[in-house]
Image (tube, rainbow, N blue to C red):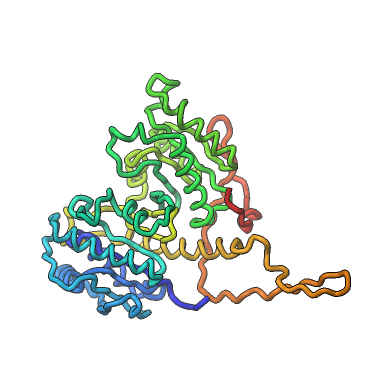
Amino acid sequence: MEDKLIRVAITHGDTNGIGYEVILKTFEEPGMLELCTPIIYGSPKAAAYHRKMLDLQTNFSIINSAEDAKEGRVNLLATFDEEVKIEVGQPSPEAGEAALKALDRAMTDFRSGLYDVLVTAPINKNNIQSDQFHFCGHTEYIENCVGDGQKALMILMNGDLRVALVTTHLPIKDVAKAITKEAIVEKTKIFHTSLKRDLRIANPRIAVLALNPHAGDNGVLGTEERDVISPAIEELEAAGIQAFGPYPADGFFGSGMYSKFDGVMAMYHDQGLAPFKALAVEDGVNFTAGLPIVRTSPDHGTAYDIAGKGIADANSFRQAIYAAIDIYRNRINYDEPLENPLPKLFHEKREEGEKTRFAIPKQKDQSRRESKPVRDERHAKPTADNSSTTTDNAAETNKQETEE
């Protein structure tokens, strides 16, 4: 592999929100350019406007193609030439159009292999709608553009908590009918694979939340737990996935039970995201799992209410860049031994009478920078009272398992 920095594409999001503020604040720190080569997909004029308004010192170099991006500097790729009217703190059609142009160019460049990972600044899901964009958000749009038939999974995460969603941007009135056994099994399998491949957790333990209050109270408050969720958990267990539940969401988060699991599968958006953001508001990251592209974003929105005031916290955006880099490296390290399931122990055979001698090829050099992933070793099955014991799976962390 070439010894080069990971190329991080960054879309500027809604130009009237805090996108440029958190981007420029992130790269005020010179050390960030030692970790990656940023390519901001956006508008030089909009970037300069926000930089001057907020009195930020981040410099950037304007490029016309991602191929022109250079290490050691902030590269800003102009995705359109025309003026964009900035109305800080206000949603506008112009801001939505500017966000879409940046995102669309980034999708085109990913298909051409011009960068490694994508980090998206927040958009306004209303003003970005157009004939080209009729999706509920980034996740669905990116899945449509580069998914190649694979299904996306929304995961909100920080160092200690990882919450995935069976349904994402759905009105509450439509949630119950979208909760099917098939959907739960499909999403949880994607989650399980991502925990192993992207986050390097050797044998993930996943908690599955209930849909109804008190997990339905044996059918008094709903039957989805008995008829849908429990059968899904049984199917997952039969497939070798450690899935437990269903757990009532309020008590699960309120008692801190989430700390006993490697991942939490929530049934709908606010069930998972409301407690997550309460617990991880400063360093949460939104990760789109299940797709060929590594895409992350901060766990906040456009924040019109504080846009232009210079008080936006860039930590979540910075953590999104760190997470994207780590996930990209983890995928390389996880996939490489599995490229050929029968190890390259013998590609050359030399016949010597009735004996066959096998030549073992030299292992290829790996010079790309690698980071050591943090491994979670909480893999013990909970006891009947929902407690768990911690076991040391250090020996298992070096295993690479083939997927079901």
Q: Nearer the viewer, residue 364 or 284?
A: 364
- Numbered disc total: 0
Q: Position of residue 191 (x, y in %)?
A: 47, 48
Q: Is residue 328 left or right of residue 124?
A: right
Q: Position of residue 201 (x, y in %)?
A: 54, 53
Q: Is 131 situated above or below 174?
A: below
Q: Residue reaching furthest right?
A: 353
Taking the spot 49% from the left edge, 56% from the top edge, the residue there is 199
Q: Nearer the viewer, residue 310 or 356?
A: 356
Q: Position of residue 168 (x, y in %)?
A: 34, 44
Residue 76 can be seen in this image: yes
Taking the spot 40% from the left edge, 56% from the top edge, the residue there is 147
Q: Is residue 59 left or right of residue 264?
A: left
Q: Is residue 34 left or right of residue 202?
A: left
Picture quarter containing residue 273?
top left
Picture quarter containing residue 145?
bottom left
Q: Is 69 situated above or below 222?
A: below
Picture quarter containing residue 5?
bottom left
Taking the spot 53% from the left edge, 75% from the top edge, the residue there is 1
Q: Is residue 154 left or right of residue 136?
A: right
Taking the spot 62% from the left edge, 51% from the top edge, the residue there is 393
Q: Residue reaching furthest top?
A: 220
Q: Position of residue 321 (x, y in %)?
A: 37, 64
Residue 52 can be seen in this image: no
